[in-house]
Each structure stands twice: as structure tokens, then as C-alpha cells.
Image (tube, helix red, strand yellow):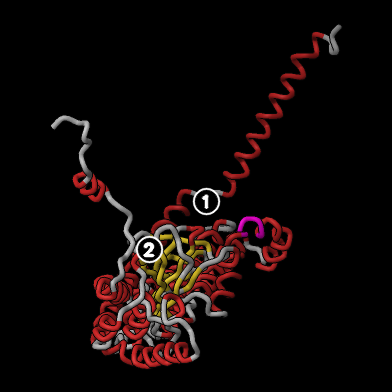
């Protein structure tokens, strides 16, 4: 069953086609009526070409003459802030402003086109002026950060994150003003519409906002400075902070690799800052020697007499030997048996511990005003650890490692002088030597 009679279908189709053609003709007529005539367009092109030629001359004058004069003057001055202004391209960007001002003044005064096309060129030129001004302001902020970096306070109070915030705000305001100029609308219209986009902006710029807040907290509380040595195992960072930006903190590791860490991660993860070590001028040494327990024994009087020749042991041995002798004498007088464990004696391990303590306190590269201790740790299957706890007066890594190595090399070499042995697990060579001294099997034929 047909909804329409057969004779009406072509009529409906013709009517739809005619309407489409009529709509296209009206649209074409709308644009044709507003296009300038050929004569008017040619005159406008000639005038605009002359105006652009003048703008080109102005641009060449400022970029090739004025900038060169400024560059020559800057190189002759002793101050560095003007060099930073030149390096940050502030003057180069400002040199683009005069030709744009000439262009805007020309297209605004000279009637190049009829309405509504006469407003197009002034709006475009004004938008270009706003963009150049925004770029110049952004470069100025960069120059301010460079000048601030010349002062030592910049290491503890960097402002690069704040500078980047100001640059983002500058470009944001520039975008709003450019849109308002091109669309011939008040900037308040765009600012009013931003309220509905707050949730979207919070979602898009979440990491940026978190890093901004974190950067303010880190710099205000002086937790991280440029030049600090930090360790952050969660991100594999172990090196020097070389840059604190709006979003990231850049760490140059000791293998010369770079680790970029989001600023807000410093508030979520633990990290170690070694700044206090260098500020205090003291770096901790905490390492132990493994002493073979079987080598620990009492010292004889002859051995003690020989050890008294060591200068750092004299303050320890003289009063200790008198104390032990007095105790043993009193024991005999009271009827005790002068033998075995009843008598007190000095051990080689205790004497060696006293020697290590005296050696550390006399060491010129150690801080005697800070904690210094030599102690036993819990015995292990590998021997009894003798731990050294002290602070080096030199904090530079190579020097610190050299001081630490010298101390332990000396102590390892001097241990046999006290009749002690350091523990070392037997190696393959040791086993081969033991096998060579083993008696042969009598049943084995020779």
C-alpha cells in the first residue's frame, strides 16, 4: 500500500531539489554581495603592499640597526644583567613590535576595504601585537630568573617555578584578549565562561597544579635546593639537583644520567637530602672489621712492654697495667689463687680496640668534636665485627673515600702486630694448598 499517490512522488522530489538549489543560490548571493569589487580589491592590495613595505623597512631598521647598537653597548658594559636580557631574546622580541604598530595604525586609518571586511586587518594586526607583547613579557620573566640566578640566594630559594606560573598566566591572558579582539567580544564574556570549565581545567591540569603547590612547599620550607645531593630510590635518583621547575625536579645522577621527578612526588615519597652533611662539614664513617675469634688471647708482659712503645697506646696501657697489677696483688693478699681466670689480664683484642680509638682521635682528617666510637658488634659465623663510628672532616666524595680507605688499610696491616687475624672465607687457592699438604692414602700404590 502506497502512502502517496504515484503522481505526487516526482512533485515532492522536484520541490526538495528546488529548495536545495534556492538555498545554495541565496548563500552564494550573500557572500557575493559582500565581496569587494575587482577595482576596489586591486586598490586595496596596492595600498596594503605599500604599507607592508613601510613595515618591512621599520622592521629592518630596528632588527639590524637598533639591536646591533644595543648589542655593542651591552658587550662593553661590565654588568651581567644586560647580557642576560640579550640572551633571553627580550630585545629581539621587542624589535618586532614597532612594525606591527605601524601596520595597525595604517590599516586603522587608511580605508582599505568596505564594511564588514574593513575590520579584519585591524583585528589581525592587533592580535599580532598582543602576541608579541605576551612573548616579550614571558622573555622578561625568563631574564628575571636568569638575573636572580646570579645571586647565591637562588640556590636555597629558586623562583623558576613561580616564573613559569607567571609565564603561563601571561599566555593565558593573551589568549583571552586575542579571542576577544578577533571575535569582537568583551574579555569578560570569556572569563565568565571559564567558571563552567573549572572542573575540566582541574582535571586537565591536575599534575601541574599539584606540582605548583608542591614546588611552593618545597622551596618555602627549604627542603630542596639546586645543588643538593639527594637520594630517592622510588625513582632511581641518586645525584645532584640541577633544576627545580614548575612541574619537575631534575636530578643528575652520578652516572651522568638525568632523572626527572614530578615535584608533587616529593610530598608523597620519602627521599634523603645530604645537604646537612656538606653544610656541617662532617660525613659519617661507619664500617667494621671482621676479627677471627680464635686469634683473641691474653697478652704477656713482654708483649705489653713492646706495645707501650706505641704513642697512642701509652695513655691507655700505663693506667690499665697499674690497675690490673693492683687488682692481682690485692687478690693474692686476700688469699686468692694467682692462677687461671682469677687474675685479670689485658687481651690483644681489647688493646687493639684502644689502639683504634686513639688512632682515630689523633687522625687529622676526622672530626674529634663529633661522636667517635669503636665498639664490638654481635659475633657472627664470620668472626666478631669491630665497628668504627666517626665523622670525616672532608665531605667531597673522592676525598672521603680516600680517608676511609687509608684508615682501614692501616688497621688491617697493623692487626698482626697485636696477634690478631682478620677473617676471610677460604678461597679455591686455599683449598688447593690444603690438599697439597694432606697425607697420601697408605693403601694407594706409590
Name the residue carrying label 1.
Answer: 36
Of 142 and 379, which appears nearest the observer? Answer: 379
Residue 205 belongs to the span the image colors magenta: yes
Taking the spot 24% from the left edge, 50% from the top edge, the residue there is 430
Comparing marks 2 and 1, which lies closer to the viewer? 2
Q: Is residue 26 visible?
A: yes
Above-or-below relation of 301 to 161 = below
Above-or-below relation of 380 to 155 = above
Considering the whole magenta stretch, tell me its main secondary structure.
helix
Q: Is residue 74 visible?
A: no
Of 30 and 311, which appears nearest the observer? Answer: 311
Taking the spot 13% from the left edge, 32% from the top edge, the residue there is 446
Quadrant of the rendered structure where residue 48 is? bottom left
User: Residue 329 placed where, x, y %?
Assistant: 42, 91
Taking the spot 63% from the left edge, 39% from the top edge, the residue there is 27
User: Residue 16 placed where, x, y %?
Assistant: 73, 24
- Spatial distance from mark 2 to mark 1, Cα to Cα? 65 Å
**What's the mark number on residue 253?**
2
Taking the spot 21% from the left edge, 48% from the top edge, the residue there is 433
- The residue stretch that appears in magenta: 202-206
In the picture, measured across the screen, residue 255 lies left or right of residue 205, that is left
Quadrant of the rendered structure where residue 10 is? top right
Amino acid at each position: 500500500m502506497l502512502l502517496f499517490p504515484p503522481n505526487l512522488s516526482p512533485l515532492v522530489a522536484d520541490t526538495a531539489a528546488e529548495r536545495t538549489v534556492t538555498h545554495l543560490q541565496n548563500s552564494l548571493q550573500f557572500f557575493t554581495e559582500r565581496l569587494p569589487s575587482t577595482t576596489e580589491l586591486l586598490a586595496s592590495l596596492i595600498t596594503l603592499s605599500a604599507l607592508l613595505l613601510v613595515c618591512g623597512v621599520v622592521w629592518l631598521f630596528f632588527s639590524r640597526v637598533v639591536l646591533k647598537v644595543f648589542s655593542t653597548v651591552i658587550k662593553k658594559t661590565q654588568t651581567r644583567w644586560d647580557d642576560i636580557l640579550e640572551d633571553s631574546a627580550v630585545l629581539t622580541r621587542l624589535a618586532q613590535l614597532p612594525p606591527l604598530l605601524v601596520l595597525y595604525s595604517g590599516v586603522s586609518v587608511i580605508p582599505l576595504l568596505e564594511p564588514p571586511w574593513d575590520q579584519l586587518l585591524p583585528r589581525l594586526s592587533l592580535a599580532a601585537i598582543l602576541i608579541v607583547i605576551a612573548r616579550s613579557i614571558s622573555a622578561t620573566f625568563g631574564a628575571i630568573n636568569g638575573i636572580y640566578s646570579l645571586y647565591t640566594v637562588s640556590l636555597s630559594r629558586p623562583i623558576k617555578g613561580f616564573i613559569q606560573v607567571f609565564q603561563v598566566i601571561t599566555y593565558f591572558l593573551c589568549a583571552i584578549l586575542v579571542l576577544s579582539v578577533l571575535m569582537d567580544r568583551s574579555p569578560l564574556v570569556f572569563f565568565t565562561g571559564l567558571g563552567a570549565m573549572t572542573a575540566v581545567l582541574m582535571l586537565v591540569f591536575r599534575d601541574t597544579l599539584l606540582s605548583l603547590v608542591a614546588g611552593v612547599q618545597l622551596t618555602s620550607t627549604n627542603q630542596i635546593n639546586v645543588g643538593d645531593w639527594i637520594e630517592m630510590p622510588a625513582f632511581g635518583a641518586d645525584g645532584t639537583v640541577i633544576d627545580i621547575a614548575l612541574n619537575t625536579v631534575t636530578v643528575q645522577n652520578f652516572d651522568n644520567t638525568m632523572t626527572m621527578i614530578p615535584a608533587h612526588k616529593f610530598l608523597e615519597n620519602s627521599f634523603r637530602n645530604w645537604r646537612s652533611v656538606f653544610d656541617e662539614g662532617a660525613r659519617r664513617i661507619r664500617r667494621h672489621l671482621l676479627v677471627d675469634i680464635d686469634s683473641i688471647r691474653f697478652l704477656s708482659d713482654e708483649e705489653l712492654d713492646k706495645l707501650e712503645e706505641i704513642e697512642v697506646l701509652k695513655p691507655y696501657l700505663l693506667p690499665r697495667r697499674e690497675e690490673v697489677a693492683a687488682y692481682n696483688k690485692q687478690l693474692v693478699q686476700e688469699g686468692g689463687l694467682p692462677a687461671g681466670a682469677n687474675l685479670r689480664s689485658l687481651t690483644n683484642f681489647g688493646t687493639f680496640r684502644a689502639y683504634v680509638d686513639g688512632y682515630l682521635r689523633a687522625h687529622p682528617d676526622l672530626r674529634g668534636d663529633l661522636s667517635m666510637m669503636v665498639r664490638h658488634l654481635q659475633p657472627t659465623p664470620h668472626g666478631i665485627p669491630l665497628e668504627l663510628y666517626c665523622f670525616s672532616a672532608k665531605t667531597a666524595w673522592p676525598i672521603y673515600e680516600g680517608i676511609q680507605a687509608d684508615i682501614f688499610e692501616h688497621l688491617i696491616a697493623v692487626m698482626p702486630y697485636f696477634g690478631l687475624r682478620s677473617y676471610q672465607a677460604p678461597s679455591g687457592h686455599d683449598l688447593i694448598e690444603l690438599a697439597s699438604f694432606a697425607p697420601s692414602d697408605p693403601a694407594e700404590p706409590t
